[in-house]
Each structure stands twice: as C-alpha cells, then as structure tokens.
Amino acid sequence: MTASAASLLAFFLVALVLLAWPVGKFLAALCNERLPRWMQRIEAPLYKLAGVQPGESMHWLAYAFALLAFNAVGAIFLYALQRLQGLLPLNPAAMGAVSSDSAFNSAVSFVSNTNWQGYGGESTMSYLTQMLGFTVQNFFSAATGIAVAFVLIRGFARRGDGKSNGLVGNFWADLTRITLWLLVPLSFVLALFFVGQGVIQNFDGYKTVNTVEATAFQQPKNGADGQALKDDKGAPVMEDATTKTQTLAMGPVASQEAIKMIGTNGGGFFNANSAHPYENPTALSNLLQMIAIFLIPAALCFAFGRVVGDRRQGWAVLAAMTAMFVVAVMVLMPAEQAGNPLLASLGVDQVSSALQSGGNMEGKEVRFGIDASALFAAITTAASCGAVNAMHDSFTPLGGMVPMVLIQLGEVVFGGVGSGLYGMLIFAMLAVFIAGLMIGRTPEYLGKKIEVREMKLISIAILVTPVLVLAGTAVAVMAGAGKAGIANPGAHGFSEILYALSSAANNNGSAFAGLSANTPFYNGLLGLAMWLGRFAVIVPVLAIAGSLAAKQRLPVTGGTLPTHGPLFVSLLMGTVLLVGLLNYVPALALGPVVEHLVLWK
Amino acid sequence: MDLVWIGALLALWAVVAAMAAGLDRLNAPKNGGGGRP
C-alpha cells in the first residue's frame, strides 16, 4: 500500500468518526423518541392528517405488517410510474414506458434499498420517474432500514419490566421522524455542496454540442423494417459511422445524488453512476461521497451505545466493522496497484509516479486514480450502497473479489443504513451464543438471554441471503437465459453472475457491469433475490426485537461475558468471517480465485 | 404483462407477510412475550 493510499484511508476514517459522533447523538434521541418540542409541533399535523398516534407503541408483528404494507404500496406506485411515464410531465427527452419486467425489477430494487439498475438512467427514465419515484424511495427505503435498527436497539434497551410487554415503537412515527429530521436535512446540505462542486440540478432538455474532433465508431445496421440486421450466425451486422456532435444528458441530479449516498442507496441518475462527471465531478466531491456513505452506519453504532446505556458497546461494534474494512482496503488497493502482469510482459509502464497513477487503470477515472477508486469500491460494497466511481468488472481478480466478499459477508461491515447495524447485532448474538457453548453458560447479550426462539430466528436471518445467492447463481449458470447474459466466458463470466446475485440478495446494488441483466430472466430472478434478501431478513430481525423487548434485562455479574473489549471484538469478527464467508468459499474458488491463478501463473 | 408482474409483486409481499405470521408462532414463550399481545 502506497503512502498516499494510507494517508487517504487514515484521513477518511478520522473525518468519518468526527462527523458521525454528533449524528449518533441525534440518532439516539430519535431512537429514544425524545425530540425537542418545536419538532413535535411540526410533526403533529402530519400525524393528525394520517390518523396516527405517534406515542402508541406497536407489537413487533403490527410493526412488521405496517412496514411491509408501506413498502408494497411503494413498489406498486413505482411500477405504475415507470409504466406511465410517457403520459406524464417532466419528460423532455420523451422517454416511453419502461418495459414491464424492467419496471418490476427497478420497483423492487429501489424499495428494497438495493438500487440495482438494469436500465441506463439517462436513456430510460423521465425526470418525474427519477424524482418522484426513485428519489422518494431512496428516502423511504433508507428510513425503513434505520427504523428496523431502532427497533432492535429498543429490544435490547427495554427493561422487560412488564410495562412494554414486547412493544417496539411506532413504525409511522419512526418513518416520519427519520425522514423529516435526519435524511432530508442531511441530503439538503449535501446536495447544495454537490451543486457547488459542479453536479448539475436542472430540468433542461438534453443538449447537443459539437465535439472538438469527429469520432468514428461502429453501430448496428438496421434493415428496412427498422430492426437490427443479423448475420448467419445471429450476430448483429455492424456498419461504420462518424459523428461530430454529442448529446449531453441533463436533469435534477444533485438532489438525487445526496440521498443516494446518505441513504446507502447507490442508484445513479446516469448509467455511469459516480464515474460520471455530472454526478461526481471533483476529488473533493468524491471524498464527501465516500464519507456520506459511511456516515449513518457509523453514527448508528454510537447511537446504539448511547441507547443501551453503555457507549463501549457501540465502540466495540464500530471497532469490529472498522478492522474488517481496513483489512479489505489493504488487500484491494495493492491488488489494483500491482496492475496486470500480461501488460507488464508487453513492456507497459504500470509503476506509480508523478505522471500517472500506475497499476490497473482499466475502468477507472483518471481524475480519481487507483487510490480513490479502490477506496470507493471498498466503501460502497462494505456499506450496501452500490454506487460506483469505477467499473468493478475491470478490477484485477483479487481486487474484484474483495468487493464481492464484502457484499457476501452480509453487508455488516458498516453495511446499509440500519441494515448494517442490525445485521452486525445478529452476528453479535450468534457470537455470544458460540461463546456460551464454549464455556457452558446460557448466552446473554446486553443483559438479555439468547434462547431457543432467538437462535432459530437468528439462523433464519443469517441463512436467507446465502440461500438466495447460491441457489440463484446455480439457476442462472444452468439456464440458457442466464448464460446468455455473460460478457466474458470462463471464470470471469461465473464471477459476473455470482456478483450480481450477491449484490441483489444482500441489497448492495453495484454490478460487475459485464453481465447483460436487463432481460426478463434476470429482472425476475434478481427482483426475487432483492425482495426476499431485504424483507425476509427484516421480518425475523423484528421478531427477535419483539422477543428481546419482552425479556427482563439481567444485571451484569462476574460470569457475564464482557461484550465491549478486544476479546469480544475478535470473537465477533471471527463469527462474521466464519459464518458469513465460509458459505461462499467454493463459489469464490470457481470465480475470482481461478481467474487470479490463471492470470499470475 | 402488467398483471403478471404486479401479481409477482403481490406474491412476494404475501410470502413475507406469511413468514411474519408464522414466526410469531415460533416457540412463543409461555409469558406471551414473543407472541401476540
């Protein structure tokens, strides 16, 4: 790892902690439902309008049904918006209706906080769909994740003295407060900053500009019927063409960009996502985007410690996340810096110098270079964001494996907003269970006994995503429609499918980009993985929270396993790596590991 | 085709709703803490 890369990582982590601390304090107040009176006055008319009693705490099942109903309505609304966009306003590029399978995929994708994009934003979606559909869901899906984390934290914090009887909070109040007082203000400030850096925010039509020089390219040749011609082998017939103009896509980008990062959503306004200069124009905007991705996941750790009454618990979870993240970055950056041995054998200079980033620059923006691209890739996959400023498909085999592994760990290394913390707390309970087995004591975490019911629910929550990823990958590599989407044959093609299923089921949303996934087969399969990967995990987590909230909180004794020290942090990391990663080792061996061995033989 | 894909959305919703109802009955403790209020 170069000195500049280490400096960038260190600066990023220090800035993150400094910014996350005050946000964590505010999140704790939100979780404890202790808001200033002026905020309550502003909220009151909204609750009155909706007929909601914000102080009325819900049983976990009622909370789950409210959450599921809200998200189902959101998905259907988003589906309808895409199908009807051709008839609706704010559509200067005259985009037609999105195909039904793509609309299904994108609706599930944005509701589940995945933001997998089978479509190209600037060539498919109207401004209204981007704003009223995707941006709104960016807020609501993020708020949903944070609300679930709040519920689990409350489950630990409740005394179980009979007053709460398993009640976990009010979903409608949580959703309103998180959106109104956390996500909207943060996004507003960040959007203004992005505009200052050069991110566009307008409703203009697309602009046609003259290029400096003519560009020669090949394009599919169309027949008299307007359809692409194909040769005897079924391959499209290409023809030479030149152009002296370029179309520049416009749109309200900054407002979508801010929540895309703050909410760990990741869905770009443009197809190139944060590699596009209108989404991420400068090194400073790139740094802020990276910090924004980790801000709420890190702040939630501090909030967790405050609400359960022991700040060391929050630090312990944050330490485990940070240690795993740093190790991942220390593998990823040198892998990309090492470059491609095949190019080295041709005499290509890949050494880092004052004149070039060096290393493997394929698929990376020159304005970010190796360090900022590799760090961004680690951050966006450690958190379940999925925004990209470089093409992961073009990373070296080891460099591409690191983002894939970070996703496959279950998005608990910081993870998505809310989902990262509740995922990590699930692993923490599993860790104390394993420790309990080793020392022969009933496991307990934060004074709550972890018993048969909780362990069954924990097992379900942990096993849902590996089943979706591995079974989905198996189906895709066996089905003709699945194999048809592969751009590169062999191990890399397998990695493309494995990455897609891992990204969908773990609600990351980034893509290896080599897979042609906008087909009815992949839109359906990945939609299924995204929905179940999100809500079939949330439901058992809510059930665990309800169960914990009803339990009495036991006092700390001499026999209690300390869960705030280095020993527990190590145990937690070991559990995440063993349980989270071992499921995928055989699949990884068939993909990136084989590719690495072939490349460096 | 719209009916097919909207039907798929509703079916996915029904799966997780049924899962929630099923988990509510999973090893519910006798004091009712994990079960219905």
Image (spheres, rainbow, N blue to C red):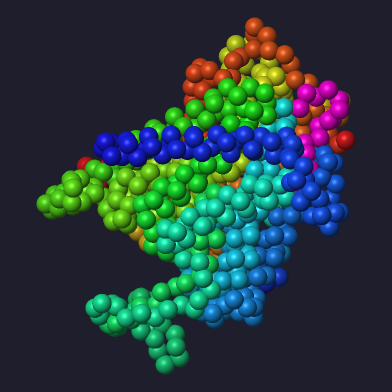
Query: Is residue A41 part of the magenta span, yes or no?
Result: no
Q: Quadrant of the C terminus of chain A?
A: top left
Residue sitting at 45 percent across and 59 percent down? Answer: A196
Q: How would you classify the magenta stretch by its main secondary structure?
A: loop
**Rendered view: A3 above or below A237:** above
**x, y percent for residue A450:** 69, 23
Residue sitting farthest toward the top: A558
Q: Quadrant of the N terminus of chain A?
A: top left
Residue sitting farthest toward the bottom: A224
Residue A136 image-quadrant placement: bottom right
Given residues A482 and A17, the one toward you in this image is A17
Residue sitting at 61 percent across and 41 percent down? Answer: A418
- Numbered range of the magenta stretch: A158-173
Image-based side of A455 in relation to A517, left or right = right
Answer whether residue A485 is visible to the viewer in this image: no
Query: Is residue A161 part of the magenta span, yes or no?
Result: yes
**x, y percent for residue A553:** 75, 20
Residue sitting at 71 percent across and 22 percent down? Answer: A448
**x, y percent for residue A404:** 44, 45
Answer whether residue A313 is visible to the viewer in this image: yes
